[in-house]
Image (cartoon, rainbow, N blue to C red):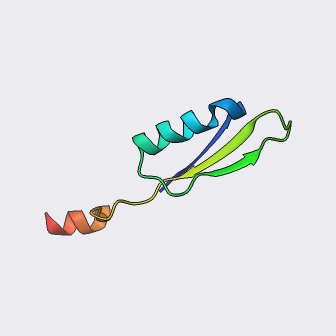
Amino acid sequence: MFEIRVICPPGDADQVAATLAAAFHVGPIRRYPARDRQRMRLYVTEEPHANTTPASARERES
């Protein structure tokens, strides 16, 4: 699992969120204003796929 933080102009936030959602299996994307109040911070957390098994389980199956 990983988390990505993206800082971007507010007008790009929807496109960035859609692109990340298309590239990864993500949970809800959290949006906050950046400290400068000019940009947006997006936090994206990857969610495990339902059909994914941990590496240790795959090794035992081999």
Residue 8 on image: x %, y % = 68, 32
Q: Give the camera-side residue of 56 and 44.
A: 44
Write the residue at 41% across / 51% down: 25
Write the residue at 13% across / 63% down: 62
32 left or right, relative to 61: right
Q: Give the camera-side residue of 4 and 61.
A: 4
12 left or right, relative to 59: right
Q: Give the camera-side residue of 31 and 1.
A: 31
Q: Give the camera-side residue of 15 and 49.
A: 15
In the rendered image, the residue lying farthest to the left is 62
Image quadrant where residue 13 sits: top right
Write the residue at 56% across / 35% down: 16
Q: How many marks?
A: 0
Image quadrant where residue 57 sits: bottom left
Residue 17 on image: x %, y % = 55, 41
Q: Is residue 33 above or below residue 56?
A: above
Residue 41 on image: x %, y % = 70, 42
Q: Is residue 38 above or below residue 47?
A: above
49 left or right, relative to 47: left
Image quadrant where residue 55 sits: bottom left
38 left or right, relative to 25: right
Q: Is residue 38 above or below residue 49?
A: above
Residue 20 on image: x %, y % = 49, 40
